[in-house]
Image: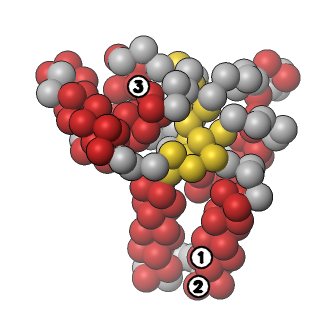
């Protein structure tokens, strides 16, 4: 079954990218091409240093395990930082208010969140993102429970 243009639409409202999405934009993985097409030209993309750190952590682990070359890790890291510098991504800061919102989300029993996921959701909410781009099933489920639209739809 082929994908239509609508399968690549993420809309024009603010969009928050978590670490799994940020990684797919900079490392060839399944669905990287589709995500690249979906965000191309979008001017309201947001991510955080938390996402950057999580991507670097995952790639460094893969490098230690021998499945990711060191030069590719450094190239991906530089490309992520450059995307912030050139305005392709807007940085959302982890300020006290974001932590308080994450803590509020953690106190909702049905949300069933991990700390980093609560921070990502709070970061998304802090920029009034209407959509969260994630490939993390648990984070996607939690986002849906608090009213965020998730892309890609599972």
Residue shown at 69% from the left, 35% from the top: 44
Query: Where residue 143 is drawn, which disc sits there?
Result: 3
Q: Is residue 20 above or below residue 146?
A: below
C-alpha span from label 1 to label 2: 5 Å
Mark 1, residue position: 73
Q: Tag 2's secondary structure?
A: helix
| Element type where label 1 sits in the image | helix
Compared across the picture, whether 73 is left or right of 121 comes to: right
Q: CA distance from mark 3 to mark 1?
A: 29 Å
Which disc number belongs to residue 23? none
- Give the image location of residue 93, x and y in percent: 46, 49
Pointer 1: residues within 10 angstroms few (<14), some, or many (20+)?
many
Residue 76 seen from this side: no
Q: Secondary structure at mark 3?
A: helix
Q: Crowding at label 2, few (<14), some or many (≥20) Cα neighbours within 10 Å?
A: some
Q: Quadrant of residue 138?
A: top left
Give yes or no for contact between labels 1 and 2 (Cβ–Cβ under 8 Å): yes
For the N terminus, give its image quadrant: top right
Spot the residue most to the front: 96
- Circles 3 and 1 in contact, beta carbons < 8 Å: no
Q: Residue at x 29, y 45 (%)?
A: 96
**What is the quadrant of residue 17 in the picture?**
top right
Q: CA distance from mark 2 to mark 3?
A: 33 Å
Disc count in the image? 3
Which sits in the foreground, 64 or 39?
39
Q: Is residue 130 left or right of residue 51?
A: right
Q: Are marks 2 and 3 in contact (CB under 8 Å)?
A: no
> Which residue is tagged 2?
70
Can residue 6 be seen here? yes
Q: Earlier in the sequence, mark 2 or mark 3?
A: 2
Say which residue appears at 82% left-offset and 40% top-offset: 40
């Amino acid at each position: 079954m082929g994908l239509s243009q609508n399968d690549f639409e993420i809309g024009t409202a603010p969009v928050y990218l978590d670490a799994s999405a940020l990684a797919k934009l900079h490392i060839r993985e399944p669905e990287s091409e589709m995500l690249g097409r979906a965000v191309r030209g979008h001017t309201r993309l947001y991510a955080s240093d938390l996402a950057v750190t999580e991507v670097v952590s995952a790639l460094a682990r893969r490098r230690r395990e021998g499945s990711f070359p060191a030069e590719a890790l450094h190239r991906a890291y530089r490309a992520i930082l450059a995307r912030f510098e050139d305005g392709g991504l807007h940085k959302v800061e982890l300020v006290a208010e974001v932590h308080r919102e994450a803590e509020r989300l953690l106190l909702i029993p049905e949300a069933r969140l991990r700390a980093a996921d609560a921070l990502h959701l709070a970061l998304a909410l802090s920029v009034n993102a209407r959509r969260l781009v994630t490939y993390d099933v648990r984070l996607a489920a939690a986002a849906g429970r608090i009213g965020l639209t998730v892309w890609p739809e599972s």
